[in-house]
Each structure stands twice: as C-alpha cells, then as structure tokens.
Amino acid sequence: MGEEDYYLELCDRPVHFEKANPVNCVFFDEANKQVFAVRSGGATGVVVKGPDDRNPISFRMEDKGEVKCIKFSLENKILAVQRTSKTVDFSNFIPDSSQLEYTQECKTKNANILGFCWTSSTEIVFITDQGIEFYQVLPEKRSLKLLKSQNINVNWYMYCPEGAVILLSTTVLGNVLQPFYFRAGTMSKLPKFEIELPAVPKSVKLNLSERDIAMATIYGQLYVLFLRHHSRTSNSTGAEVVLYHLPREGACKKMHILKLNRTGKFALNVVDNLVVVHHQDTETSVIFDIKLRGEFDGTVTFHHPVLPARSIQPYQIPMAGPAPVTSQSPVPCKLYSSSWIVFQPDIIISASQGYLWNLQVKLQPIVNLLPDKGRLMDFLLQRKECKMVILSVCSQMLSESDRATLPVIATVFDKLNHEYKKYLDAEQSYTTALEAGQSRSSPLLKRPARTQAVIDQSDMYTHVLSVFTEKKDMSHKFVIAVLMEYIRSLNQFQITVQHYLHELVIKTLVQHNLFYMLHQFLQYHVLSDSKPLACLLLSLESFYPPAHQLSLDMLKRLSTANDEIVEVLLSKHQVLAALRFIRGIGGHDNISARKFLDAAKQTEDNMLFYTIFRFFEQRNQRLRGNPNFTPGEHCEEHVAFFKQVFGDQALMRPTTF
C-alpha cells in the first residue's frame, strides 16, 4: 500500500520516556497530558514529560511505598501522589515555598480512594468507592480545605479535562452514570443517566466496564462514548459505538450510533472532531464524522465509516544512542500492539516501547478515497487544516483528466460559499455591534474566528480559477461555464463579486473573440458594474469598438465623476482610452496637456507619446492659432524629449492663413 492510501498517522515527534519495567513504573496524567516515569518509588528519580514541553521535569522523592497515582496540578504548581487507599501526599513546586510534604486523608470513614483529579492549579477531587470529595489546596499553609462532598457508591470513575466533568459508574451493574461538573471552586451535580446494556444480564454483577466508556469533546459538545459489543441474542451484525450527548444543562441524551459491522477488541480516539475506532484483530482503523448526514430513525442518527478501513501508516522508531550506532536502520514499530493504551482525545501510549504519540488525520489521501465530491467537501470543511486540500480538490475537478460535471462543480462552489457567507455575516454582525458600542456592555463580544474552511474569492482566484483559465487544452465553453457558475454561486449567497473575477471572464471572452457573449453579459447585467471593469472595457476598444460605449454607459450608471474616470484610465496607462473618453464627452479643450504627456512618457511607448504630443499641438493650433505650448502649461521637458527622439523638424509649424 502506498503512502497515499493511509489516512491516519502517528506524529513524527513523539514523547520518548523510559519504558516500563519492574523498577520503572509509568503513569499518564490526562489533564496535563504528561507521562511520569517513576523509578524505585521515586527514590532514584521521577521524570515528567509532556507533548509541548521539550524540557522534562526531573526530581527525586522519598520511597514511601508503591505509587498508585501521581499527577501535577495545572501549571505544574503542586504535585499529588497517592500511595495508600486512604491518603494523598502533596509537595509544592512553587518557587520560594516549603518543599515539605503534607498529607490529606479522605473524609469518609472506611472509604478507599480510587484516584484523584486536579480541576485547576489549586483544586483537587478525590474519588472514593463511597463518593466524591472536592478540596481546595492551600500551598502556603500546606493544608487542604474541603469545599464539597457527595456520598454515592462508585465502581469506577472517568475524567474529561476539556469539559471539566467527572463521570462516576454507580449501581450494581455499573451502568448508571453520574456526572459532576467543576468550575472555579464550584461542583455541580448533573442529571444521571443509564447506559443501555446490549442484553439483559444473567447475573447481578458489574456489567459495564470502564474499558468500554470514553468521554470526549466533539464539535464543541461533550459526549460519552459507549462501545457496545456484539450480543449473541440480537440480530445485529457487530459492535457499535453509542454517543450520549452530555449538556451543561438538561438530561443526557442518546444521539448517534456508529456501526462498526465487526466484532473483537476495539479502542477509541477522537482526532479533529472525528471518532477513530481501532480494531486490534484486523489491525485497521475507521473514522466517523457525526456532522455528515446519517440515517435518522426519529431519535438517533446511525453512521457508517466515512472511508474504508485502513491501517495507521507504518511507523519507524528511530534508533537512540551514540551517533555511530544511530546509523543503524530504524526499527518498524509494531502497530496495534496489545501493549498500546489509548487516552482521549488523540493519545496512544506504548509503555513497553516508551513512546507517547498523538494520532493525526492526513487529509490528502482522503481526496481519492471519497469519490462523492459533495460529501468530500462536507467532510473537508469541518477539518482544521483543510484550506490547501480543498483548493487542490477544486483544481483537480477542473483538470482535463479528472473533470467533474457542471452540477457537481456547482455543488462544490455552493458548499464553499455557504461557509464563506456565514463568516461574512458573522463579521458584519460583529462590526455592527462594535459600532453600536456593545463591546463595553457585553464583554462576550468576540471577533468571529476565521477558520481554514473560509475560502474567499481571492483564494479561489489565485489558487484555482486564474491557473485554470490559462490552460491551453481546456475548452473555452467549459472555462466560461465554470467562471459563470462560481459567479452565480456568489450571487446566490448575496456575496459581492470582486471585480477581478469579472475581469477574468472578460479576458477569457476576448481571448476567444466571443464579443457577442460579452455584450450580452453586460447588457443583462450578468457582470456587475464597477470602475475597474469599465476601465478594462475602455482598453478593449481597439479590438471591439462597441466596448467604448458599453464602458461609458457603465461609468454613468455608477455616477462616476468624469475627471475621476480619466485619472483611473491614466493610472492604468490607458492614455489613448482616456483621451477618447474626454473627447467623447467634449471636455478635451480644457484638459492638462502635461498630465497626459507625463502618462504617455511613463508607458515608454514612443509612438504613443508622438500621438499624444501631436494631439495637443493640434489643439493649441486650433485654440490659439499656434501649435507651441505656453510657459504656463509646464511642458518644456516634454518638448525637449520630443525633439530628442523625433528631431526639431518633427515639431508642428504654425499655419498661416
């Protein structure tokens, strides 16, 4: 399989840590995404590494028994270590504060601590088999203060740091889940909900395993993912992942079901808002996108994998060691190894090899795996790094070898412009609110973020359309149809079409001598009026004489001042067009000769300069009976230039009657 076939890969800069062995224990903290390698209970050193910090934290601590759990508070201010089922020990890592350890015992009698979670730099939650205890840590006093506690029987717990939600498994079967939400010193109990088990359990014992539940934020919403294995009693064709939406307010609701159509051992990740399901038996993974249209049965939406199952791209582990040794070839990494542990959202850890990877989605290979361009666009527009891939898809669908039909091209343009319009509207609302002075009264007013899904007209022009119109082998009818389709789409979404797109249409029509079509487009206002467009038409007069009048009509519709039109034409070096325009409106007796001669000289076209110079000589003769320029016209340097290029004899002689 070529590299272009794999759509999932492990990041190329993994976190490398000392692999797990009898002396070295490895822990992972989901909140800070840090790996702890604890040697001999910490006595011979603890090394902490995170994905972002390339400088690991190293320290030693007294070996006071086996470490069950170890985590830093947010910002690495305070270290918490659990060694017994009753207590957690704390050490300050704040500069100039006491290094002495302090201990907190759980409040509930006869309770065992299952684990703990930091919810901020100084707030921590103990989860026991009999409930939950929320504390504030006071590092300067080296003590803890209980903020709130709740008694409830707990089988196991799960923490989602992104949503600051702890999920507790309760009841004998374990399938009633109780969420708690933490924010700025407060703990809120959210409504509990029941996970539907695949079949009626035969015995009353724990049925819902922690292994089959994950929590993740997908498209800004918190979901509980339940991996429901194939049940022999039902006629289903395999396992499925059930997504329960867990809102801040209101009850948890079953929303989506991802059909896996296979059985066996699975693991879940969430990458770029996609649910990735790894299947160990076949060593492949599939991805699901809950934003894509699925089959809705009135209560839940069923989704199938977006793409065929593929393995993660093969990965080589670089050989560590002294330089001469590293010349050895890298070792292929065993993918889907039974020693892999996955953490949300996108982390894969191999404790036996000593690596932590972030899983990544590769978008380019997906382009060829999803033939339906409309669905492909829906998929790509939701991805973080999508802009260049989308533009490459647009170029590809306009290429000779891979050409799409016009209805498909229209669909793609409409999908892009729908996103573009959403952004323009949000930007407009923001500006209006800002001008109305709402920013002071509403601190929540934020400028809309411009994501990569916003493909504007300049992106399309630069990367797709201008390149496409220059292709020699392309049928001009198709080129014009595509350009008009894009303009139609912009108009449909009430987006003002930029003049350079109209210019592209006109240049293409002129190139193929399709003047009748140009005339029609202008007559029926298919191409919107604009000054740059009018100037372009004026410059076409030599190829197509009616363009002059079309242009003047357009400028009049725009109620443009005549002198402004002249300035615009001169700035575009359309000196003759400017002169013709001025003659057309009868203002040529009052214009500044110097301004026109300056512009003509700048074009470095001597024959043009000659024509303009001669025109003004003739004007002088007609108005004053003498072709020479008066001192007030400041044309001395132009007269000198004319003589230098064409000689004295070329100057007009005064005519005498």
Image (spheres, rainbow, N blue to C red):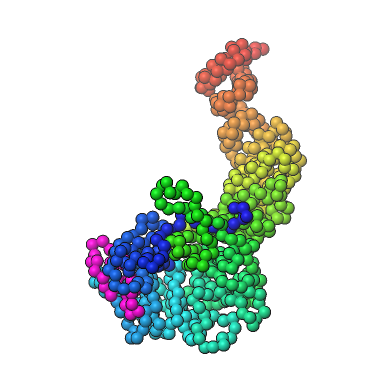
Residue 562: quarter of image: top right
For the point 64% across and 29% down, the residue is: 576
Name the foreground residue: 460 vs 18: 18
User: In this rendering, does residue 49 appear at all?
Assistant: yes
Residue 597: quarter of image: top right
Position of 95 with respect to 392 (left or right) is: left
Q: Give percent across and percent down for residue 377.
A: 63, 57
Name the foreground residue: 39 vs 584: 39
For the point 41% across and 51% down, the residue is: 321
For the image, the number of numbered tags is 0
Q: Is residue 87 magenta?
A: yes
Residue extent of the magenta highlight: 77-103
Position of 310 with respect to 548 (left or right) is: left
Q: Is residue 524 above or below residue 644?
A: below
Q: Give percent across and percent down for residue 204.
A: 52, 88
For the point 50% across and 50% down, the residue is: 329
User: In this rendering, does residue 439 appear at all?
Assistant: no
Q: Give percent across and percent down for residue 26.
A: 40, 66
Q: Give percent across and percent down for residue 186.
A: 38, 75
- Image quarter (top left, top right, bottom left or bottom right) of the N terminus: bottom right
Which residue is most to the right?
516
Residue 16: quarter of image: bottom left
Q: Is residue 614 above or below residue 121?
A: above
For the point 61% across and 27% down, the residue is: 589
